[in-house]
Image (cartoon, rainbow, N blue to C red):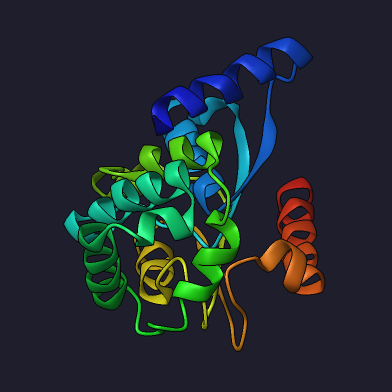
Amino acid sequence: TIETLAEDVEAVRLAVGFETFHLVGHSLGGMVALSYALDHLDRILSVCLASTTCHNGRRASALGYLLSRVSELGFDAAMDDPQIQSALEMLTGSVAKYVPTILEPLRKVTQEPDRARALAWKSTAGFSVRHRTSELCRPTVVMHGASDMLMPYAAGIRLGEALPDCRWIPVEGAGHNLPVRRAEIFNEALLSLIQEVRCPA
């Protein structure tokens, strides 16, 4: 679960001996970062979130379970099952406006069976901290690619609006993997956030 992964973050913190730190999360890692920060606010200096969400509703959770199954079987084997194929086309169509374009990227990342990826997708199902976002009273950056095929852009907008001390950075023409594909923008935003916390106005 996301909570299990957040507990792992705390275990790492204890192992390395950090008292406080800047927390960065991308995609699934952003959900983990939100969960951790809300339960360990005294440890957090700032939070940088990219391509993520504070809430996976009914459709997104159903998609998480389904993609977990696709990852477990491998894309081609999963699509040989008419029920899985139909459900995948329906759910991706309801969550993302890019269908059928989104199916090809999904094929690439789920071509071979991958239990770790399957567990990662499964952990996103039912995740929601939207009722607690007002508690995250730390300097925060939220950035999201306007052409993200895996995490709806609207989810990033809602997250940015929900956090009390947040700088929202939309990235036009960008997809999901901002830390790699838009490294200059990502790094500049992160370093600026850290510097602001170190040297408050």
Name the residue: 23% across, 53% down. 62
Against 91, residue 61 (above or below) is: above
Q: Residue at x 49, y 50 (%)?
A: 74
In the figure, 132 relative to 13: above or below? below
Q: Quadrant of the N terminus?
A: top left
Specify the quadrant of the image occupied by residue 10. Answer: top right
Residue 134, percent from left and from top? 33, 49
The residue nearer to you, when weighing 70 against 129, is 70
Front residue of 144/82: it is 82
Q: In the figure, is residue 165 to the left or right of 169?
A: left
Q: Nearer the viewer, residue 101 or 182?
A: 101
Residue 182 horizontal side relative to residue 173, left or right:
right
In the image, residue 53 sits, relative to residue 8, either above or below, namely below
Image coordinates for residue 152, horizontal then vertical, percent: 40, 72
Toward the viewer: 201 or 37?
37
Q: Quadrant of the C terminus?
A: bottom right
- Residue at position x 45%, y 73% in the image: 103
Q: Tell me if residue 168 can be seen.
A: no
Q: How many marks?
A: 0
Which of the 4 quarters of the picture holds residue 184?
bottom right
Q: Tell me residue 18's x, y (percent).
A: 74, 20
- Residue plotted at (40% across, 51% down): 70
Q: Is residue 170 visible?
A: yes
